[in-house]
Image: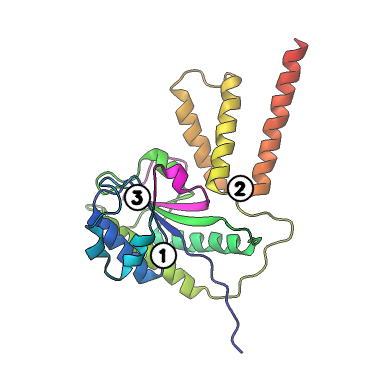
Amino acid sequence: MTTKVNLPIAPIVILARPQMGENIGAAARAMMNCGLAELRLVSPRDGWPNPLAVPMAAGGRKILENAVVFESLAAATHDVSFMVAASARRRDLPIKNADPRVAATLLLAHARDALAFDTGAETSPRTALLFGPEASGLNNDEVALADILVTAPLNPAYPSLNLAQAVFLMAWEWRMATLADSEQLADGPEGVSAPADLEKRAYFMSRLQDVLAREGFFSNAEMAPIVHRNLTCLLARSAPTEQELNTLHGILTLFERNTEAGGDNS
């Protein structure tokens, strides 16, 4: 008797500010090779659709046809709870670093968790692979939104990959991880909520920064974006569930009430 296996939903591939249509098409072909189907584009330089992408996509043309364009990375990750960002180099940021194989394993584990906690809602937490523009790669603010920064152990004299090569490398590692792990997905632990998506985490960060600003935490204007980035990385590393994030919101609410009460009594 064959046991039915519930496979986790494959990660979304997000290309931030891609520059060349040919590379977008080649990336779609790489996705099709490895069983990834959902492509999101953030502010493609030459607009979309781009006829130069079609010949390079070959059998992945359907992926191009279904690709969705967003004006910002925040909008493109509104339903993402766990994201891996790819870069040719490590960054001076407090973010987990991993090679492609380890990153794919962690991505699969998180995708399984999201599937286990699926409540049947129209949208469930998703995972994503994030890639930057060909010329410069992702900037630090974009990397800070990710849970893991992946760098491949390539020739240190020339570690840079073409965009489509980078997509294929991570898509291949995802496929190998899913093929190696075909056990039946168990139910999630009772009483534990689903992972908080990036939109919910971003809202909490916005609220926290407002509280810090009102309390005079920032000694100067230059300090605010640095603190915001550091706290964003901290939150990403912790990968909080919705329940945990609600607890943090409760702490902020209590803090605000106590502050207001203190102001009324003065």
What SS does tag 1 mark?
loop
- Residue 92 in view of the camera: no
- Marks 3 and 1: CB-CB under 8 Å? no
Q: Which residue in the protein does label 3 denote?
A: 87
Mark closer to the observer (3, 1):
1
The residue that appears at 61% across and 26% down in the rendered structure is: 211
Q: Residue furthest bottom?
A: 1
The magenta stretch spans residue 249? no
The magenta stretch spans residue 76? yes
Find residue 231 and report its horizontal and vertical position in percent: 53, 36
The residue that appears at 63% across and 55% down in the rendered structure is: 194
Mark 1 packing: few (<14 Cα in 10 Å), some, or many (20+)?
many
Q: In this view, does 91 lie above or below 127?
A: above
Magenta-drawn segment: 69-95
What SS does tag 3 mark?
loop
Dot 1 amino acid type: Ala
Dot 3 amino acid type: Ser
Left or right of 189, for residue 138: left
The disc, 3 or 1, on the residue closer to the chain's N-terminal end is 1
The residue that appears at 26% across and 53% down in the rendered structure is: 160
Dot 2 amino acid type: Pro
Find residue 88 and report its horizontal and vertical position in percent: 31, 50
Q: Which mark is residue 37?
A: 1
Left or right of 41, for residue 114: right
Q: Which of 69 and 30 is in front in this view?
A: 69
Q: Which mark is residue 240?
A: 2
